[in-house]
Amino acid sequence: MQINISSIKNEVGASKHAELDETFNPIEFDGEDVKFKEPVRISLDITNAGDFFNVQGTVSTVIELNCGRCLENFNYVLEFDFNEDYYPVKEENKLLEDEEGIPFTGEEINLEPEIKANIQLSIPMRQVCSEECQGLCTHCGVNLNKKQCGCKDDNVDPRMAVLQDLFKKE
């Protein structure tokens, strides 16, 4: 995913708008492949700030995640702000260590690595299909969102087992 900046490269303060729809292959997150259900929509403004180019805008897509409670796949709408600085380097071997931002050479900026990294950072650590998800039965494994299993929940915290005996006597 390359953005050509030749039209604003020589004029400080010049900017350019870009709207992109990109199809990404699945990316790895927490040991699993995350699939894209829709193209990644990117709306960006690129501004020549003199020593660097500021790229900012929004990124949105729909990804498929796996619920941590019921283990069912669900679609998750992902939308985040994107803001990165790219600085031009005359030679690829001369990267300045004190520069903040992402180096690039030539007339095009490759946005794909940073977009993918930001997508990974935007995926929630705790993935649930809904806050009301009841998960799986701890005894038989049935999805409690789809049907009730009728298992009796006899699990008692061993520290409280003594109290259970008190209630049986009365």
Image (cartoon, rainbow, N blue to C red):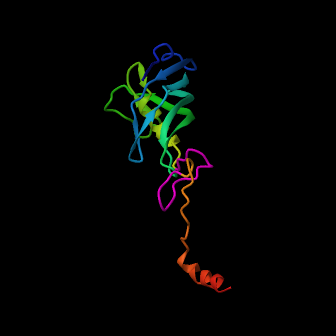
Residue at point 53%, 19% (across, down) = 19
In this rendered view, identify the residue nearer to me: 148 or 144: 148
Q: Position of residue 27 (x, y in %)?
A: 40, 37
Quadrant containing the C terminus in the rendered view: bottom right
**Tally of marks:** 0
Residue ranking furthest to the right: 170
Residue at point 50%, 20% (across, down) = 20
Q: Height in image: 62 above or below 121? A: above
Q: Quadrant of residue 111?
A: top left
Q: Position of residue 71 (x, y in %)?
A: 47, 48
> Which secondary structure dominates the residues rendered in magenta?
loop
Residue ranking furthest to the front: 150
Residue ranking furthest to the top: 7
Q: Position of residue 129 (x, y in %)?
A: 56, 44
In this rendered view, identify the residue nearer to me: 125 or 94: 125
In this rendered view, identify the residue nearer to me: 62 or 68: 68
Quadrant containing the N terminus in the rendered view: top left
Residue at point 56%, 50% (across, down) = 147
Residue at point 54%, 30% (across, down) = 59
In this rendered view, identify the residue nearer to me: 25 or 109: 25
- Is residue 48 visible to the viewer in this orientation of the structure? no
Q: Height in image: 6 above or below 169? A: above
- Is residue 106 visible to the viewer in this orientation of the structure? yes
Tell whether position 134 is magenta: yes
Q: Which residues are magenta?
A: 126-143
Q: Position of residue 10 (x, y in %)?
A: 49, 16
Tell whether position 65 is magenta: no
